[in-house]
Image (tube, grey):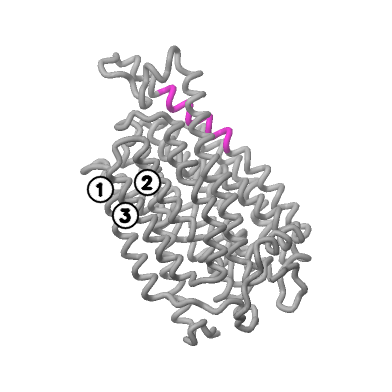
């Protein structure tokens, strides 16, 4: 099928493949810039003498606050203006901020860089969701989003390997320089190559010059669809546990198994890439296939995966064999990630074309604030608390940066390392319990979803 774009060009199959390919690379650098900080967190903590709470803030609220606040305004712009331009500019902003992180010499410098990364990345989710909704039919959207979101495991693997290599061979700062510069190149290519699609043609809607529904109309439509509210709430809740794990998994591996940064980065990168790929593919293609028989399967699939995942995480965080832990982490992560692509697809399918960017941004805002913002911050705080409880004495005074003071004896050094490892292990065990609540929200959404789907010609609650 071919679709006409707003400027009159034809979006033929080749153009569709180019779009998916380039959006994959944008997604890759989106997550590479996050992963490189995660794998270098222990090295940065030691060099700059940070606490786990400060690491959590850098990976959480510093990144998430403006990300979540800017997502909706950018989405409203995307309903009216060129989404391609927004995508290119945002990619350039977060890449420049990543490059800036390489020059940081303090917590405050890193916080500024991480805020910049969040500002740029706020534009990715609403714009890519909106363009996918206009380019592809309803029963293809989860699958296409799954293909684009394969940039997530590829990006995490890229960020992990680049970060681990440069931290051990040269200096951790070079990893930020290289990824930031490469992202700037991708931003330029997106701006030159991708064309803006017409809004609504994949649903059979004629091009419209009328303004999109205003934000109060979006909120009214949101309130009229109980399944949509439950899906956004479920995905945001799942994001709390998922982001907590992803941002501290490399730290957990380094501490628990006494790994050097490069080895921990390799385990983190390949483990994350494996479960992200498996989970995204099962969640996108599997639920799209099953939805042909019953349209509730995307919600059911998410609920099932989120119910199974915690049990494998509990096992993975409490075994003492790295290879068994890796297998368990891959199974757990695969079950967890089933929810992600169907969530994007369901949000698109429940909203009319000129509300989709706003719907994706609403999900991204809550997912980021609850997941990326509160999750890592919560884990960092709980980890510090648990380490303090496990340590015989004043942990923060005796173990700045999680390691013993210079000149301390071997037993003191071992006590610091053991308390740090126990702290992060116990914090992660707490975090995964949130998946049960997320599973319940998706199950409740499945009971209403068939009544709420958007169909061309169906009466919608909007006001223009």
Image-based side of 92 in relation to 450, left or right: left
Image-based side of 235 in relation to 53, left or right: right
11 drawn magenta: no
Are the residues at dot 3 and dot 1 in contact (C-beta closer than 8 Å)? Answer: no
Find disc 3 in the rendering and name its residue. Answer: 179
Q: Residue at left 38%, top 35%?
A: 254
Q: Position of residue 330 (x, y in %)?
A: 50, 48
Q: Residue at left 60%, top 47%?
A: 238
- Nearest to the observer: residue 161 or residue 401: 401
Find disc 1 in the rendering and name its residue. Answer: 174
Query: Few, some or many C-alpha atoms within 10 Å of disc 3 (few <14, some 14-19, many ≥20)?
Result: many
- Name the quadrant containing residue 360: bottom right
How much space separates mark 2 and mark 3, taking CA atoms?
A: 14 Å
How much space separates mark 1 and mark 2, taking CA atoms?
A: 15 Å
Find disc 2 in the rendering and name its residue. Answer: 113
- Nearest to the observer: residue 345 or residue 180: 180
Classify the position of the C terminus by image quarter: bottom right
Q: From the image, state whether disc 2 or disc 3 is nearer to you.
A: 2
- Nearest to the observer: residue 371 or residue 161: 371
Q: Residue at left 58%, top 65%?
A: 357
Q: Position of residue 20 (x, y in %)?
A: 46, 71
Q: Secondary structure at mark 3?
A: helix
């Amino acid at each position: 099928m071919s679709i006409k774009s707003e400027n009159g060009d034809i979006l033929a199959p080749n153009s569709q493949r180019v779009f998916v390919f380039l959006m994959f690379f944008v997604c890759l650098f989106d997550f590479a810039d996050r992963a490189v900080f995660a794998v270098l967190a222990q090295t940065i903590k030691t060099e700059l003498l940070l606490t786990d709470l400060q690491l959590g803030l850098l990976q959480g609220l510093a990144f998430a606050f403006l990300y979540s606040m800017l997502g909706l305004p950018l989405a409203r712009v995307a309903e009216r203006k060129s989404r391609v331009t927004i995508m290119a500019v945002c990619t350039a902003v977060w890449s420049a901020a990543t490059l800036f992180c390489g020059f940081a010499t303090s917590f405050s410098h890193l916080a500024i860089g991480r805020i910049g990364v969040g500002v740029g990345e706020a534009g990715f989710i609403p714009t890519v969701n909106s363009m996918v909704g206009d380019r592809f039919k309803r029963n293809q959207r989860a699958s296409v989003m799954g293909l684009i979101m394969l940039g997530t495991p590829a990006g995490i693997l890229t960020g992990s390997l680049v970060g681990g290599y440069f931290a051990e061979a040269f200096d951790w700062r070079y990893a930020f320089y290289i990824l930031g510069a490469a992202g700037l190149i991708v931003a330029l290519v997106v701006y030159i190559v991708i064309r803006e699609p017409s809004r609504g043609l994949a649903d059979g809607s004629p091009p419209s010059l009328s303004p999109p529904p205003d934000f109060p109309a979006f909120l009214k439509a949101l309130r009229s669809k109980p399944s949509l509210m439950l899906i956004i709430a479920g995905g945001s809740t799942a994001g709390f546990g998922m982001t907590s794990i992803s941002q501290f998994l490399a730290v957990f591996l380094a501490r628990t198994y006494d790994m050097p940064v490069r080895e921990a980065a390799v385990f983190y990168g390949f483990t994350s890439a494996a479960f992200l790929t498996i989970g995204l593919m099962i969640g996108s293609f599997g639920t799209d296939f099953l939805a042909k028989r019953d349209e509730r399967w995307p919600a059911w699939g998410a609920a099932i995966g989120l119910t199974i995942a915690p049990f494998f995480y509990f096992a993975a965080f409490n075994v003492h064999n790295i290879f068994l832990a890796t297998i368990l982490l891959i199974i757990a992560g695969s079950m967890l990630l089933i929810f992600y692509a169907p969530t994007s697809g369901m949000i698109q399918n429940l909203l009319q074309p000129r509300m989709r960017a706003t719907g994706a941004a609403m999900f991204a805002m809550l997912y980021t604030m609850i997941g990326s913002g509160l999750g890592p911050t919560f884990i960092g705080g709980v980890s510090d608390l648990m380490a303090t409880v496990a340590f015989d004495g004043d942990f923060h005074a005796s173990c700045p940066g999680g390691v013993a003071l210079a000149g301390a004896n071997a037993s003191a050094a071992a006590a610091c390392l053991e308390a740090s490892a126990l702290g992060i292990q116990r914090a992660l065990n707490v975090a995964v319990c949130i998946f049960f609540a997320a599973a319940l929200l998706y199950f409740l959404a499945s009971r209403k979803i068939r009544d709420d789907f958007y169909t061309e010609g169906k009466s919608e609650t909007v006001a223009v």
